[in-house]
Image: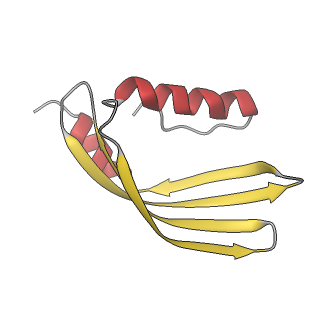
Amino acid sequence: MPWSRARSTRADIANHFRTIAEFRVPGETAGSTPRILVDGKEAVVLGDIRQTLKATGRPYTAFRALHLTVEDGLITRYAVYKDSLTAAEALAES
């Protein structure tokens, strides 16, 4: 999946979100965030994301967890852990 790779700079992260937008059908994105856990400057966000891919028209739902670090009002760490198999299956040609 073109949007899934290691990134380490602010520009890389911005490009990540632009790349995701290129592959997904606008207006067909949803999700839930049933848990947000915070401990000092660290936070974990648990939930799912529902999207439809442009290339295949297939929708998918993937569970995800975000690990964020916030320092001086800025996100200094943004790590995503998700069920990427469901997105890969939706992207694959039949």
User: Is residue 12 shown above or below 4?
Assistant: above
53 left or right of 15? left
Q: State how the image is colored.
A: secondary structure
Q: Residue at x 36, y 27 (%)?
A: 23
Is 18 situated left or right of 70 in this image? left
Task: Name the quarter where the N terminus is drawn.
Answer: top left
Q: Position of residue 55 (x, y in %)?
A: 24, 24
Residue 57: x and y in percent read 18, 31
Viewer-closest of 59 and 80: 59
Of residues 67 and 5, the one drawn nearer to the viewer in this rendering: 67
Residue 45 to residue 11: above or below: below
Front position in the image: 57 or 84: 57
Q: Is residue 75 left or right of residue 65?
A: right
- In which image quadrant can residue 38 be found? bottom right
Which residue ends up furthest to the right in the rendered image?
Answer: 72
Which quarter of the figure has residue 32?
A: bottom left
Question: Is residue 19 something that shows in the picture?
Answer: yes
Total tally of numbered discs in the picture? 0
Task: Where is residue 52? Give x, y as percent.
Answer: 26, 38
Name the image quarter holding residue 26. top left
Rendered position, 78 above or below 45: above
x%, y% of residue 20?
Answer: 45, 32
Residue at 16%, 30% (x, y): give it.
93
Query: Does the image show residue 48?
Result: no
* Residue at left offset 52%, top offset 26%: 18
Outermost residue toward the left in this view: 94
Quarter in which the C terminus is drawn: top left
